[in-house]
Amino acid sequence: MGTDKIISAVVIGDVMLDSWLRGPAKRLAQEAPVPVMSLEATEDAPGGAANTAANLVALGARVRLVGVVGDDECGEKLVQSLRLLGVQVDLVTVPGRRTAHKRRLVTSGQLTARYDEEDRDALPETAERELLRRLADAGAGADVVVACDYGGGVCTPAVRRALTEAPLLVVDAHAVAPWRECAPAAVLPNYLEVVRLLDGDGSGGGDTDDRPAYLMARSGRLLELTGAGMVVTTLDGEGTLLHRDGHPPYRTYAEPAPQHMATGAGDTYTAAFALWLAGGATPEEAAEAGQAAAGVVVRRPGTAICTRYELLRALRRHEGTVQTPERLAQLLDAHRRRGERVVFTNGCFDVLHRGHVTYLEEAARLGDVLVVAVNSDASVARLKGPGRPVNPCEDRMSVIAALNDVDYVAEFDEDTPERLLRMIRPEIYVKGGDYTPEMLPEAPLVRALGGEVRVLGYVPDRSTTAIIGRMRALP
C-alpha cells in the first residue's frame, strides 16, 4: 500500500455465521439413498460481512463492523468469534430475529449438503434508527467504508443514503443497481449479476462462453449503469476484470480451485482490494492484491482469512523471485510505498549449506522484504580462484529463490554489490559470518544511503570452500 498508516475501515452489511460439519460417511440411509455422516468436528467462522471484517483485521486494518444479529445462540457465537479476531463489533441485536446461519456438511473433503437459517424481513424502524446511529458514529474519520449487501435486509435505502458522503465507498453486492445513486468508488458484482444488469437493459449476450470478451465490450455501459468510479467483475474462478473510465479493462488471473473451496474468497478479495485502495495503491495494484488474497484462502478448507504477511508473500511470488536489477528497483519502490522495509544481503552461494539457510532466515526477520544478490560466475572466479564456481549462476539463483524466506534474487557482476546498493538503497544491509561492520567494504556506502549495517551469527564449521575441499579429496 501507499502508506504505513493503519487504515481505519468500517464494514456495514449482512453478517452470518458459517458452520462446517465434518465427518466420515460409510453407509447410505435406509430412508433414502443419501449418505449417513458421522459428525466428528464442527468449525464455526464469521461469514459474509463479518468475514470481510475479519479479513480486513488480519490484513492490518482497524475495523468496526456494523450490522444486525438476532438474540439467539448463533448471534452470540458470531460476536464472540469476531471479538477474538480483533474486530470492533457494533451489531444491533433485534429480538426475535434469527441470525443468518449457513451450515455445510463435508465428508471426505466433499461438500454434500448445505442448509441455511435466516430472516430477510424488513428491519423494525427502531432497529434501523439504531443501525444508522451506529453507522454515523463508526464512519466518522474512517478511511474506507465497505458495504456488503447480500439481500439480508441491512442495506436499506436509508443506509445507502447515509453512505453517499463516505470518503471511499466500496460495495460488494449481489445487486448493484440500487447503489447507483451513492456513486460508490467501486462495486464488485459477480458475473451473473452483471449479466442481469446488462441484459435487463437490452445489451444482451450473457450466454456467451467468452466472458472476458463479453464484459470488455460492455465496459463503458457497465460503468454507466452502476454509477461507480470502477467496477470489478468476477469471472467465476478465472479471475476478475477491472473496469474504469478512460482505461482499458484490466484482468487478473486466478489459479483453478474446486468450487466448494471458494467459500468466502469473494469477501477476502473485497477486503484486500478496499484496503489497498485506501492505502494509496492504484486500482490495478488493488485488483492484484485482491486476487492474491483470494488465492491464499481458496487453498484452505472452510471459511478462511488471509493475513497481511501471507498476502505480501503471495504478491511477491506473483511478481517473480529472480529479477533484473532494474526491474527489482521498480518493484522495491512499490513495496516502500506500502511502508515495507527492505533487507539486502549478498554472496556467492556456490554450495548452499546450513549456515547460509540459517542466516537468511534470520535476515528475513529483520524487515519485510529480503533481497539476495548473487555474484556472477565471472565475479566468483575472481574472488575464489580457478575452479569456482562449482555451480553456474543460474542454478545458484534458482536454489536461493526456492527458499521460503527469500523474496527477490538478482545477479551482479562486480566484486562488490555497490551498484545494486545504490539502485536499491536498502534499509538494512546484512552479512553472515565472523565479520564486524568495519570489515565490510560496503558499510560506508550503506550508511551514506541512510541504511543500517548488521552482522548476523553463523553456524560454526560450515563453509562452502571446506565442503568443496572435502568433496575433491574423496577417492
Image (cartoon, grey):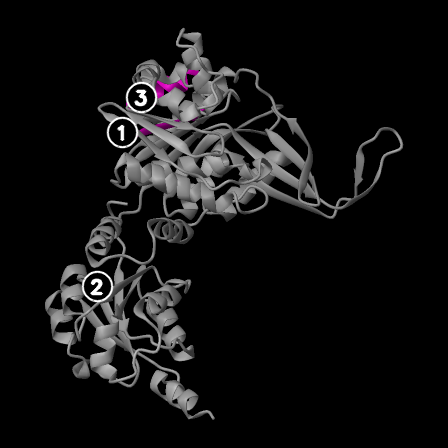
- Is there CB contact under 8 Å for labels 1 and 2? no
Residue 54 included in the magenta stretch of the image: no
For the N terminus, the image quarter is: top left
Residue at mark 1: 167
Q: Is residue 105 left or right of residue 401?
A: right
Residue 320, compared with residue 28, is above or below; it is below
- Distance between the alpha carbons at the discs numbered 1 and 2: 33 Å
Q: Residue at x 34, y 76 (%)?
A: 350
Q: Residues within 10 Å of mark 2 (few under 14, many from 20)?
A: some
Q: State the mark number for residue 406.
A: none
Residue at mark 2: 427
- Which of the 4 image quarters holds residue 428? bottom left
Q: Secondary structure at mark 3?
A: loop
Q: Secondary structure at mark 1?
A: loop
Percent x, y of residue 84: 51, 48
Residue 436, compared with residue 225, is above or below; it is below
Percent x, y of residue 234: 43, 29
Give the mark toward the camera: 3 or 1.
3
Q: Is residue 139 left or right of residue 269?
A: left
Q: Using the image as rendered, state which of residue 304 and residue 27 is in the foreground.
A: 27
- Distance between the alpha carbons at the discs numbered 3 and 1: 14 Å
Q: Using the image as rendered, state which of residue 228 and residue 71 is in the foreground.
A: 228
Percent x, y of residue 152: 53, 22
User: What range is drawn magenta here?
Assistant: 156-175
Q: Specify which label sits upstream in the sequence, 1 or 2.
A: 1
Residue at mark 3: 228
- Which of the 4 image quarters holds residue 464? bottom left
Furthest toward the left, the residue is 448
Q: Residues within 10 Å of mark 3 (few under 14, many from 20)?
A: many
Furthest toward the top, the residue is 202
